[in-house]
Image (cartoon, grey):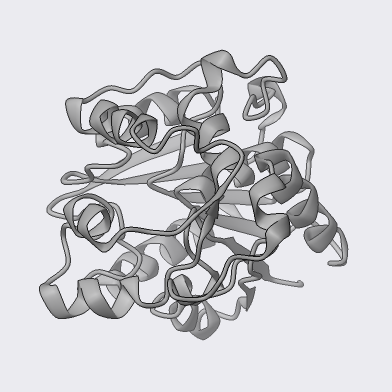
Amino acid sequence: MAKHIVLIHGAFCGGWCFADIMPVFAERGWSCEAPDLPYHVPGPKRKPAPQLAKQSVADYTRDMAEFVKRLPEPPVIVGHSMGGLIAQQLAAQGLAKALVLFAPAPPWGVLPSTEDEMNLAKGLMQASPFWDKALNPSFDVAKGDSLASLDADGQRRIFDMFSAESGLALFELFFWMFDKQRTIAVDEANVTCPVLVVAGSEDKVISAVTCRKVAALYANATFEEAAGRGHFLIMEEGASALAGHCADWLAKVVTN
């Protein structure tokens, strides 16, 4: 049986963010690939590609769909944050054997659940107009939200690998109610594969409450809350053990 996993990263990141968990899946016999989304060049001091500002979540999903279609059969898709939303859209196209979603961005129609989530959107509004630009990451912002559960050395090490991100994609994610195209919508009824949603109890970006709402959208979903973990749970201490737990789940639900 071919055992393929495609891992899709979130905003401001790259395939590098799965470095701590990919070896765990590989040890279980999975062939893993973690492609970068278009124009995501690591290093916050690098000048963003001009094309990045025009990238929509729809472009990212289309690019990842082309990537997974190269495989002989639908893979397991692992998604983190924005990559989790892309993974949901791919599953709705019948392109996933199963989903493992770490702190997934919610699809169109799911409102923020916590003050932290709302403050993140407010922070974006202060960068106005941001939706037609490529935005560089801010260390002061990242250490207070996405990287809040890492120590100071870990925060700096990971942040130094961040890339710029499309303001258009961020607009579609955070202000979906103003997007007439409904870019981040998911045809929920078409997601029939097994889905595991893993949320960090201390996540300040996408709360466990919101992640539970995501899991509730799908008929074949399991929700788990990881105590003490934040948004970047895939690179926090204990990430390998968390990946091992997810691999155990996959062994139960993926039978062919």
Residue drawn at 68 percent across, 41 percent down = 56
Depth check, front residue: 216 or 175: 175
Task: From the viewer's perspective, tell me whether residue 128 is left or right of residue 169.
Answer: left
Depth check, front residue: 107 or 190: 107
The quarter of the displayed image where residue 52 is located: bottom right
Depth check, front residue: 179 or 35: 179
The answer to whether residue 64 is visible is yes
246 to 153, vertically: above or below: above
43 to 57, vertically: above or below: below
Residue drawn at 46 percent across, 66 percent down = 247
Task: Say which quadrant the N terminus sits in.
Answer: bottom right
The answer to whether residue 55 is visible is no
Position in image of residue 105 (x %, y %): 46, 38
User: For the view shown, which residue lies furthest in the front direction?
Assistant: 129
Residue drawn at 29 percent across, 52 percent down = 231
Residue drawn at 27 percent across, 57 percent down = 142
The quarter of the displayed image where residue 119 is located: top left
Task: From the viewer's perspective, tell me whether residue 16 is left or right of residue 138.
Answer: right
Position in image of residue 184 (x %, y %): 62, 29
Task: Say which quadrant the C terminus sits in.
Answer: bottom right
Position in image of residue 112 (x %, y %): 33, 23
Position in image of residue 74 (x %, y %): 78, 56
